[in-house]
């Protein structure tokens, strides 16, 4: 750490001062190295770490170097690290940003990205018309998102240039008000400026064709994205950020700091950050716990748990093994947006998560389900062995949509050799998972084909975690089998009608 990086004087010591930042990269299969660099960068593999280190030279001037550690030993570390980092766009979006000023700057970036479409136009009129047409197509997704917010603005567009010299130094954006008048971006509400700004930056930063194949991914560092947004816009922007990062075509990763439970709940990984002496300490935390800790410590406001995760469909299940397994299966089959939770994870005040506790909870709070955000319902998925009477009781507690919102696992999708001794979700596991666990001594059971596999209740309980671990190691939908993927299909069907 250097003196300019802290408000306190750094004590003089004999030890050499150094700042070091280390980042591990695990590349997706969609990541492509440009042809001119492929032979060099392919040496990195798909899992490697780049460390950037700053020290002071004899003249007390900072110098930096790169250290690269990959799956294989590589030479030319400095050059390779810089070549790789040049493939990634990093954008920092600070708090206290004046959106209209950033929009003004980014309108120039938009103009440059459209230049390629304007070649061959003979007159200023043709050029202006072509620019407006191309910009309108580029901004169409942003226009759709803006209209969904209920804003008194529609059809955002670049401010029309009047002369040739203005063509690539545009002066911002404009939209149409409800009266039909044109309203400049500086006169929009601050929340709608900010919301539109994110839409524009997403379109620009993930429009990889404008980089001629050299840029491969984008990382945003976002500071308190909730600033200036009312709750409805918060929810919509949080949902957009989540959808963008889940879309593999976007190749976008977002790192954000926030005091908002809405943005916290939209994330897929969370950290509690606090000062520890002169340093910041980061502690990884499950998202539901992070939300509740923020409430208890006064960092954020309180949200009724049954209304939590307003950007995602929520599926309440009976136990933590169900949560882990179904989350894994949903991600594998392309539905990472669905949040599977057991009751104590949804509401830490609840200590038990079985069917009886869920029924009691729904009787107390089920009336609030109608207030959940559109597109993010909560449904209940009960175990296959719940009786008809218990199912009816749960549906009654859920409310008017109980016949759709409370679902019992369809036991016709279980493997025929896994009988009723396999209580819970384990009856839907692929037969190979169970047989492998038996052969390795992880599950004590009798396997005599073609009879059902016989297992004692106590032996089955002790083998549950080993079975779960084997399921989580399977990374294809075929490997997970028809039973587990069928449960996700059952959930998807319920989400469409509830």
Image (cartoon, rainbow, N blue to C red):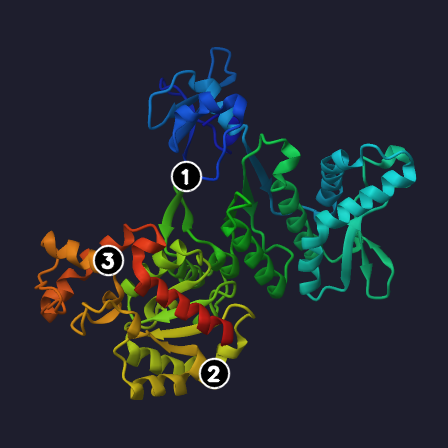
Closer-to-camera residue (497/353): 497
Q: Is mark 2 on a helix, strand or loop?
A: loop
Q: Which of marks 3 and 1 is in front?
A: 3
Vertical side of 478 occupied by 132: above or below = above
Counting other residues with Cα less than 10 Å from the Cα at mark 2, is it few (<14), some (14-19), or many (20 or more)? some
Of marks 2 and 1, which one's residue comes earlier in the chain?
Answer: 1
Vertical side of 226 occupied by 351: above or below = below
Q: Mark 2 highlights which residue?
A: 401
Of marks 3 and 2, which one's residue comes earlier in the chain?
Answer: 2
Q: Residue at 67% across / 52% down in the picture? A: 194
Marks 2 and 1, Cα distance to the nearest angstrom? 51 Å
Q: Which of marks 2 and 1 is in front?
A: 2
Q: Label 2 near label 3: C-beta < 8 Å?
A: no
Q: Residue at 39% across / 41% down in the picture? A: 277
Q: Residue furthest top?
A: 58
Q: Label 1 near label 2: C-beta < 8 Å?
A: no
Q: Is mark 1 on a helix, strand or loop?
A: strand
Vertical side of 291 occupied by 75: above or below = above
Q: Residue furthest front?
A: 450
Counting other residues with Cα less than 10 Å from the Cα at mark 1, is it few (<14), some (14-19), or many (20 or more)? few
Q: Quadrant of residue 493?
A: bottom left
Task: Tell me: 73 left or right of 469.
Answer: right
Marks 3 and 2, Cα distance to the nearest angstrom? 32 Å
Q: Mark 1 highlights which residue?
A: 279
Vertical side of 56 occupied by 206: above or below = below
Closer-to-camera residue (100/312): 312
Task: Tell me: 497 left or right of 168.
Answer: left
């Amino acid at each position: 750490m250097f003196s300019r990086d802290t408000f306190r004087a750094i004590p003089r010591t004999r030890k050499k001062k150094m700042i070091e930042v280390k980042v591990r990269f695990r590349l997706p299969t969609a990541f492509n190295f440009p042809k001119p660099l492929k032979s060099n960068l392919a040496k990195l593999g798909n899992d490697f770490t780049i460390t950037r280190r700053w020290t002071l030279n004899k003249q007390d001037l900072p110098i930096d170097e790169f250290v690269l550690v990959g799956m294989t030993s590589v030479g030319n570390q400095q050059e390779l690290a810089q070549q790789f980092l040049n493939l990634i766009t990093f954008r920092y979006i600070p708090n206290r940003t004046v959106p209209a000023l950033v929009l003004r700057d980014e309108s120039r970036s938009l103009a440059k990205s459209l230049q390629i479409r304007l070649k061959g136009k003979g007159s200023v009129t043709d050029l202006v018309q072509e620019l407006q047409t191309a910009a309108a197509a580029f901004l169409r997704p942003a226009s759709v998102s803006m209209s969904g917010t209920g804003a008194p603005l529609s059809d955002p567009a670049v401010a029309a240039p009047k002369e040739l010299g203005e063509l690539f130094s545009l002066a911002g954006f404009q939209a149409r008000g409800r009266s039909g008048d044109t309203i400049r971006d500086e006169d929009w509400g601050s929340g709608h400026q900010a919301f539109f700004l994110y839409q524009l930056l997403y379109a620009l930063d993930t429009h990889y064709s404008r980089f001629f194949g050299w840029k491969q991914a984008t990382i945003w560092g976002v500071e308190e994205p909730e600033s200036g947004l009312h709750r409805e816009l918060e929810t919509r922007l949080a949902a957009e950020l989540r959808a963008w990062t889940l879309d593999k075509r976007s190749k976008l990763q977002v790192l954000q700091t926030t005091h908002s439970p809405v943005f916290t709940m939209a994330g897929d990984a969370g950290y509690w950050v606090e000062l520890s002496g002169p340093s910041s300490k980061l502690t990884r935390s499950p998202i539901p716990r992070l939300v509740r800790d923020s409430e208890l410590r006064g960092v954020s406001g309180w949200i009724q748990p049954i209304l939590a995760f307003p950007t995602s469909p929520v599926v309440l299940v009976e136990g933590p093994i169900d949560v882990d397994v179904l989350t894994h299966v949903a991600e594998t089959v392309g539905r990472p947006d669905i949040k599977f939770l057991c009751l104590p994870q949804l509401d830490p005040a609840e200590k038990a998560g079985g069917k009886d506790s869920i029924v009691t909870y729904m009787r107390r709070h089920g009336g609030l389900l109608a207030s959940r955000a559109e597109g993010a319902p909560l449904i209940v998925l009960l175990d296959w062995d719940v009786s008809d009477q218990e199912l009816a009781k749960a549906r009654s507690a859920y409310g008017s949509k109980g016949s759709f919102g409370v679902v019992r696992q369809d036991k016709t999708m279980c493997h025929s050799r896994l009988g009723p001794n396999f209580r819970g979700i384990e009856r839907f596991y692929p037969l190979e998972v169970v047989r492998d666990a038996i052969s390795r001594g992880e599950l004590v059971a009798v396997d005599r084909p073609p009879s059902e596999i016989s297992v004692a209740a106590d032996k089955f309980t002790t083998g549950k975690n080993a079975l779960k671990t084997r399921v989580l190691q399977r990374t294809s939908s075929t490997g997970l089998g028809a039973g587990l993927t069928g449960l996700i299909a059952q959930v998807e069907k319920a989400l469409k009608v509830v």
